[in-house]
Structure formats: C-alpha cells, structure tokens
Amino acid sequence: MTGASVSLPRIASAAYVLLLAAFVCAPARASAPDTDPRSALREAALLAQQGRLEDAERRVGPALADPATRAVAQSILGGIRLQQQQLGESARLLEDAIRLEPRLIGAHLTLAQVYTLEKKPKAALGLYRRVIELDPSNASARIALARSEVEAGSYRAALNTAAPAMAAFKQTPDGLLVLATALLKTGDRHAAAALTADWTRLSGIPQAWTIQFAVLLAREGAPAAAVEILEGARTAGSSYELEFNLAGAHVLNKDSAGALDAYDAALALKPDSRPALLQAAALAERQGELERSLSYWIRLRKIAPEDPDTLLGFGRVCLKMDLLEDAEPALTKAAALKPDDLAAQYTLAAALVGKRQYESAQRLLERLLASRRDDPQLQYALGAVLYTQGHLDDAVAHLEESVRLQPEQLASPYYLALAARDRGDDAQAIETLSTLLRRYPNHAPSCEALGGLLMGARQYDEAERRLRDAVRLNPKSVKAHYQLGLLLARVGRKPEADAELTLAESLRKDDAESSRLQLRLLDAEP
C-alpha cells in the first residue's frame, strides 16, 4: 500500500477561505452603502477566493489609507500575498494587521498558515491557541491544533481538542483524517471505522485524500472499512493508485481473491507496474495459484530480465510446478547475482535435487551450513540430500541436529523414520511415524510409510487404516495405492486388491512422480 502515516496533509484552500474571516471581531463603521469600505473589502475577499488576485488587490487599495479599515485591509492583502507565495510580505502585513486589531481571527489563521510554510511550527501553534481563546468554537484552529498534537504523538490531547467542535471535524476531510488517526492510535478502531459514513457523505474530495484516509484505516487495524471506502470511490472513477491500494487493503482484510482482482485492475491501468506485479505474484504463490503467479513473473521478466529477485521468484514457482528445465537456469543466475542470499542459494539447491544432481546440491548446502550451523532448515535439507544418496549415518546426524534446533517440526522426523526403516529398525520407524502423525495427522507421506511398515509387521487392520488415509490425502500416490492393493491381496480381498493395483498402474508416471518426490526433500514441511 502507498501513502498514509500520522503526518497529515493540509487543505490547500485555507488561505483564501480565511480571507472572509478577516472581518470577525473587527470593529464596524456606519457608511453609505455605495461608499462602505467594508463592502469593498468583502468583495475583495470574494475576488481573492475566486483567484482574481489583481482585481482583489485593487479593491483593497483604498481601504489601506483609512485607519478604520486598515487592519482588515492588511489582513486581506496578506492573504493575497500568501496565495502569490510572497511569504515574507504576507507575514509582515498580517503581523501589522494583528498589531492594529488583536482580535482579527482571520489574520491569526492566515498568519499561522504562513508560519507553517516558513517552518515555524511553534509560532503557528501559538496563533491557533490564540484563535481558540478568541473563539472557542473555531473549527479551523482546532483542526490545526489537533493535527499538530497527532503529529507529536499526543493522540488523547488531539481528541480533547477536537471534542468541542466534533461536528465540524466530521465535515472536512482534514478533520476526519485527524480524528481517524487519533482514534486508531488510541485503540478505538470501531469509532474510527464509523467515520467512513462521514467520509462518504462529503463531496468533491480529491481521490488522493480518499486513498490517504483508506490507507490509514487499513494500516492501523480497520482494513474492512478501508475496503469499503475504496470500493465506494471506484464508482466515481478508478485509477492505478486506487486499485493498488485497494489490493493492499484486501490483503490486510485477508481477502486474497479480492486483492488479486484489484491487482489485475491496477495492472490493466499500468501494465508495467513492478510493485503490483511483484505483490500479485507473491500473493498468488502463497494461495497456491501457481499458474497465475507464474504469469506475473513472466511479465516481470520481460520488464527486468536480469533482476535477481525476479529470477528467484520465477525459478521458485517453476520449481513448485515441476518445470525444472525452466527453474534451474533462472535460479542459477539468481544465485550468482545474490551469492550471499540464503533464499536464492537454498532454492537453487532444491532445483539441483529435483534434477537428481545430488552431489552438486550437497556441496552447495554444505557451503551454506558452514556459516549457519544453527539453521534447522539447512540441517534438515543436507540430511535429506544425504539420505537420498544412501549416506544414512551422516543423514541421521544432520536430521537429529535439525530436530534439536527445532523440535516442533515435521520434515526431519519423517526422514529420520525412513532412515530407521532403511537400517532395519522397523520398530523405531513405526514409533517415530506414529508420534509424528499424532501432531500432523494429515501428512500423507507419513501415513503411506507407516502403512507399509505396519503391513510388514502383520498389523493389517491398522496398516489398512493408514494406507486408506494416505490415498485419501493424496489420491494420486502410486505407492499408496500399490501398497494398499498388496495388503488387500494378502488378506484375501482379491477384487478390491485388483482395483487398487489397476489404479496404481494407471497413475504410474515414473519420471514425474520421482521428480516431485525429490522436490519435497527440500521443502520446510514436505
């Protein structure tokens, strides 16, 4: 997501809006309507609000010479100079206006804007506090003061400042942002989310402000409200920024499907957006939508073919899809570009195992482990590779170390059980797998291995239960169906046995199955 922290933006229109406030608390003087200088000044303020600065300045001119109207005239002229970005002249005029008439609220507010632009926050806050003394209900001053308190981390103080003018706060985007930030930072997410109704009632808000408000809600724990705000903003017209941030809000709201749809909408508006492609690719991969993820990585490779992170992501997804011929060259290049990156090196090792290049994978893992002896996943991976090569003693040493470093895991105990079986210690293998399945009852390979061991021990009822679990959890497992067929044949259930053996034969795809088996060796939890 983009945007949004507690440093809140200001409404740019404040300068000319405040010009009309220049008359507040100013003394009145009776005059004929045609010659009333106050009417001329009011007209000047309206002209300035419309952006007609030269016309406004001409209307102000005569009032500068009249002591009775000089303070108000200087206040309005100071506001004009602010719009012209002549900050020094604006400050001089406004300071003089306040000296002549200390109760000119408009002059105080406009001068506070000037001081803010001049990076004089203390002086600006002093003026806002003075306005509140003069007019406790003044919303502009309270919003500015509450904003400064939010930016200083004084969230309770900001809420206290807002309380007397709460209705006015809810009628401006600036005020709502201040309120939402203070409420979220004090833990009142429900009240902050309720502000979405107030936001949607406002009209003419720039889309950037709506995105700012939604991102604030999403990041501070109210993502559902953020989604509501951004979905509503879609009706007035979409943009890349809106769709990208809507995707982020959906992610935080744990709606992956909505997030991916929003990323696609963002990419339709900006097809070469690397942030959107990267985040969509990663999310699709996490959700198991590997083909969709791969499509994003392919687009990224066209944009940045030599980017190591892109190569790594592309290669990793190809590896998960068993596209080894595509995975290995991409991962080899990524590992060369990122020689110190554990993920790049480890994923390359997984690809090497998938291609049965066990010795190369072993050397790579040994190099990684040399400086990371306390990494349980590396200990497991090397142990699994050694097991695959039949080096049982070395494999067991690394697998046991992995379990010591991370006792609550699935991968290493599974291969320790297989090593015990291959050493002829079926009792130990059965005990290890039984313990493992109590913690991970849906681990199909453990069910399959335990079923085979129990069949060898003539515990046919329990063996059948485990093998049926294995085929339920992984219906395409050739070995599970084959072993179940053998077991059924042993106990004289020939028709059932023939059905299982026929199914096993129909599923047999030696190359693909053995490749997928090897890929599991380097998963954290196969």
Image (cartoon, rainbow, N blue to C red):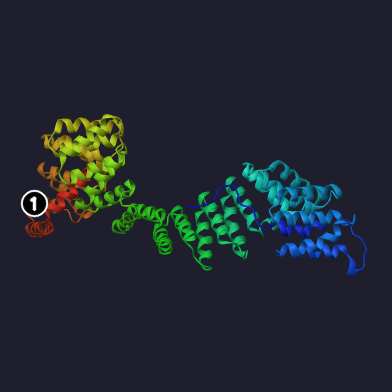
Q: Amino acid at mark 1?
A: Leu
Viewer-proximal residue among 401 and 358: 358
Residue farthest toward the bottom in the current orientation of the protein: 34
Instruction: Find disc 1 in the rendering and name its residue.
Output: 486
Quarter holding residue 21: bottom right
The quadrant in which the C terminus is found is top left
Left-right relation of 177 to 379? right
Residue 453: x, y in percent? 13, 42
- Residue drawn at (72%, 59%) of the image: 16
Residue 342: x, y in percent? 31, 38
Viewer-proximal residue among 241 and 408: 241
Viewer-proximal residue among 270 and 76: 76
Residue 219: x, y in percent? 51, 50
- Residue drawn at (46%, 61%) of the image: 240
Q: Element at badge 1?
A: helix
Residue 388, visible in the rendered structure: yes
Left-right relation of 218 to 408? right
- Residue drawn at (33%, 48%) of the image: 307
Viewer-proximal residue among 318 and 289: 318
Residue 24: x, y in percent? 82, 57
Left-right relation of 127 to 186? right
